[in-house]
Amino acid sequence: MEWGEILKKVLPREIYDFFDSYAGRSLIIKGHAGTGKTILSLTLLEEIADIDNSFYFSTRVSNKALYSQFDWLKDKDMRENLIDASMDFLRTLYDIQKHETKKSSVPDKEDDRVHKVEKARRVLGIFDNKSPDKFTPPENTSRIFLHSLMGDSDISELEEIYDRVDSRLPASSLIIIDSLESLIERYGVDPSSLIKALQKDLVELSGTKLIIVIEAEESTKWDYLVDGVLTLKVEEEKGRRTRQMVLNKLRGICIDRPVYLYTLADGKFTYASPLDPKLPLFEDGHEPILDGEGTSYWERQLFSTGSNALDEILGGGFVRNSVVLFEFSHDVPLAGQMNLFGPVLENFLAQERGVLFMPSSRDKHKFVNKSQLFEDKTKKYIKIIDMEDRERNDDIKHIFKDAYKQLKFKVDQPILTICDWVNIEHSIGQPSDFDEVDRVKIAKDMLDLMRKNSGLTIGLMGPGFSFVDNARYVADTHIKVFTKYNSLFMFGEKPNTEIYNITLDDKDHPSVRYVKQV
């Protein structure tokens, strides 16, 4: 799957493959209250099914609540097929039929013979298809296991569900039952027997897609009866809430990623996009966000981050003449780091401002060799400082001053300094060369020098930095960046923000998207 196609998908690849593999599929969605089971169920309905052949049976959420929470249901004209088949629909069936004379559901000998013949034909029909991918739906819905179930319990209301599926054959239907516990309580039926009847009759013998919602996270004896199981969980991460979707079982599907983080922002189910390992390409040119004299940014003494979305998250942008700290976990690659500092770097260059960049020795060559990251007309405004070229351990300030003078000679605009602070520490020298007091003083003097000569100073800090507490203290803006389950995330410590998933869109010139994790 191409990167652009991944970004356009609402659900993980494994789920699409699961429902595309066979005509009939069954999936259990498990999770405690508030994990987003209903939102995911409706997302599946919209993504994988024909709306006209979809039925959502809810015993927990009223029609009015569904419409108020999911506006798209009105746009999809779901009143007939979805809302009619929800809580009010089941209640109507129950009220009508509870007053009828109960008919014996035990078949006589002739009926029993017919049932056995029908069952045999169904089974032979499955073998005749040879491959599940070539499954041909029957002309009528199988009711073999339903009749068997009705021999023990009065659940004649379920006949109407079967009738709905039957009316759509040979087209495949999608049925969502939300939730299993409510149906069990309503009918007083054994849950395993109920799931088995739905699985055999509707899924295997009639080609129906079936989704069952369960109000629990724990493994149950019902899991083995269906084709797929996924669990929704809410957990704590960095003192903030995150949501996990665990793909416990998807029969016949290779699960590349067993866990995905997701969000319910804006009432929609959105999974966290994976991190693109490639360095972003900037050769098409960045459309600048003007923040110079005469703009609202200028009036508020701010620089844009190069991203309208990040500007909004941080309350407007970066304060002029301030220090910004991006603190990266050990597993964030250069590509992930550039998603954060790349846009502001571009925004400075696009407005013909200077950029002093002091990358780590590890990343320097990757960055320099990607000269196509910048347009030819802006290359003269950036100066990459190689700290390995110094001759003495104590000339770090001299190297910076010299580079600053060279750049200032070319531009008469504010200068952005981007510096790998771990690299600065290594440039100071080994602990044996200076005592701790001297090392802290050199680091502080270097930071003061950057702040004094820069319109904006951005520090890049990873694990292993000795002066981490000092760096966090002096930073006016402090953003932490980490990866989890192959996705990139950030949150603000200064200012305090929620967690956001970071990804690039698939435009000609990539731009960064920030999706709140709530």
Image (spheres, rainbow, N blue to C red):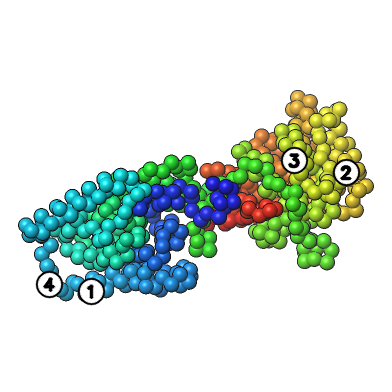
Q: Nearer the viewer, mark 1 or mark 2?
A: 1
Q: Measured from the top left, where is residue 446 in percent x and y? A: 81, 40
Amino acid identity at mark 2: Tyr
Residue type (three-letter) at the residue carrying disc 3: Lys
Q: Disc 3 marks which residue?
A: 370
Q: Residues within 10 Å of mark 2 (few under 14, many from 20)?
A: many
Q: Nearer the viewer, mark 3 or mark 2?
A: 3
The circle drawn on residue 95 is 1
Q: Cα distance, mark 3 to mark 2? A: 23 Å
Which residue is under mark 2?
404
Q: Choose the circle earlier in sequence order: 4 or 2.
A: 4
What residue is shown at x 71% (from left), y 33% (from top)?
362
Q: Residue at x 13, y 69 (%)?
A: 102
Please indicate whether residue 304 sits to the left or right of residue 92 in the image: right
- Residue appearing at x 24%, y 64% in the figure: 158
Q: Nearer the viewer, residue 434 or 343?
A: 343
Name the residue type under label 1: Asp
The numbered disc on residue 517 is: none
Residue designated by label 4? 101
Circle 1 or circle 3, nearest the eye: 3
| Contact check, label 3 and label 2, Cβ < 8 Å | no
Q: CA distance from mark 4 to mark 2?
A: 93 Å
Crowding near pointer 3: few (<14 within 10 Å), some, many (20+)? some
Residue 167 visible within the image: yes
Q: Specify which label sits upstream in the sequence, 1 or 2.
A: 1
Rendering coords of residue 17 (x, y %): 44, 48
Answer left or right for 455 relative to 162.
right
Say above or below: 398 vs 516: above
- Asked if marks 4 and 3 touch (Cβ < 8 Å), the reply is no
Of the numbered discs 3 and 2, the one sitting upstream in the chain is 3
Q: In the image shown, does 164 or 248 lie closer to the viewer?
A: 164
From the viewer's perspective, tell me whether residue 342 is left or right of residue 218: right
